[in-house]
Image (cartoon, helix red, strand yellow):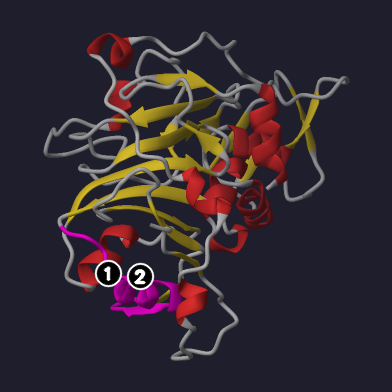
Amino acid sequence: MAQRLGKSRPQKSRGQAKSKKEVEKKSSYSKFYKKETKKSNSEEQKAPRSVKKTVFSGFDKDDLMRLNKYIAKSGVCSRREADKLIETGIISVNGELITELGFKVKRNDRVLMDGQLLIAEKLHYILLNKPKGFITTTDDPQERRTVMSLVERATDDRIYPVGRLDMKTTGLLLFTNDGDIAKKLTHPKHRVRKVYQVSLDRALTKNDMQKIIDGMELEDGEIIVDKIAYVEGSDNKKEIGIQLHSGRNRIVRRIFEHLGYEVIRLDRVVFAGLTKKDLPRGKWRWLQPKEVDFLKML
């Protein structure tokens, strides 16, 4: 039996119906969503392939760095936001207030923000395959397990998660102290691609799939997905692959809950072009330089 799948069209006027032929049209996209086979315990615990630690100092050949970049590397904010801080006159270098946006600092300069010392740390990029039972936060007053405990041995420098996955959701989560990259990957205008594999409590009907394709109105506004398909190799149509760029809270769960389905499992399998290949659940790895370069070009 041919798979039913669809691809959203944001330009289509709301309420405009698609033909049955269009809904049932085959697409090679569905091949991306292949049902994962159960791995043995030994495979699950196998450590990912060793990758050299990826760090970048940020200073040029003359040992100089733009002040806004230095501030961003300290983990305070993005470079654009750093420019605003400089203009407000709260940044000082070696005791002198600096308001010039093109100002450059030397490696041993002392940079303060409102009297607080800023240290430009080496940049780190860490990819985690998050398991269930951990919340995405750097600290929890209720002392629940956080994702930080899973990467605590990666570096002594401060890093933080980019975006979030709820406690029950598994899959890819990026950590960094690069304020520019973090800002880019979470800002809606960059339309960062995220792909999830969803397991539902019952089969998704073709009528409900069409509703998702056409766009849905949730309590916080309309949501349009990029692509959606039944997972290849699953005959019960409970396994769904969905691609979207929205970063709204619990958005995938809310899409299906709005239609009366319960999400049994939710796994993020792609984030900004990064995949789970060779990365078992609960393990992490350093990004390779080419992967960092790719993120910077998004």
Q: Position of residue 59 (x, y in %)?
A: 76, 24
Q: Is 216 included in the stretch rendered in magenta?
A: yes
- Would you place residue 47 above or below residue 290 in this image? above
Q: Is 284 included in the stretch rendered in magenta?
A: no
Where residue 192 is drawn, which disc sits there? none
The residue under the point 55% across, 48% down is 185
User: Which residue bears the numbered disc 1?
Assistant: 205
Q: Position of residue 42 (x, y in %)?
A: 28, 8
Region rendered in magenta: 202-220
Q: Amino acid at mark 2?
A: Met
Location of residue 252 by image quarter: bottom left
Give me the C-alpha separation between circle 1 and circle 2. Answer: 6 Å
Left or right, 68 with respect to 77, comes to: right
Q: Position of residue 109 (x, y in %)?
A: 70, 24
Q: Position of residue 167 (x, y in %)?
A: 21, 42
The residue under the point 61% across, 18% down is 54
Q: Amino acid at mark 1?
A: Thr
Where residue 209 is drawn, which disc sits there? 2
- Total number of numbered discs in the rendering: 2
In the image, farthest residue toward the front: 1
Label 2 CA crowd tier, 10 Å (few <14, some 14–19, many 20+) = many
Q: Are marks 1 and 2 in contact (CB under 8 Å)?
A: yes
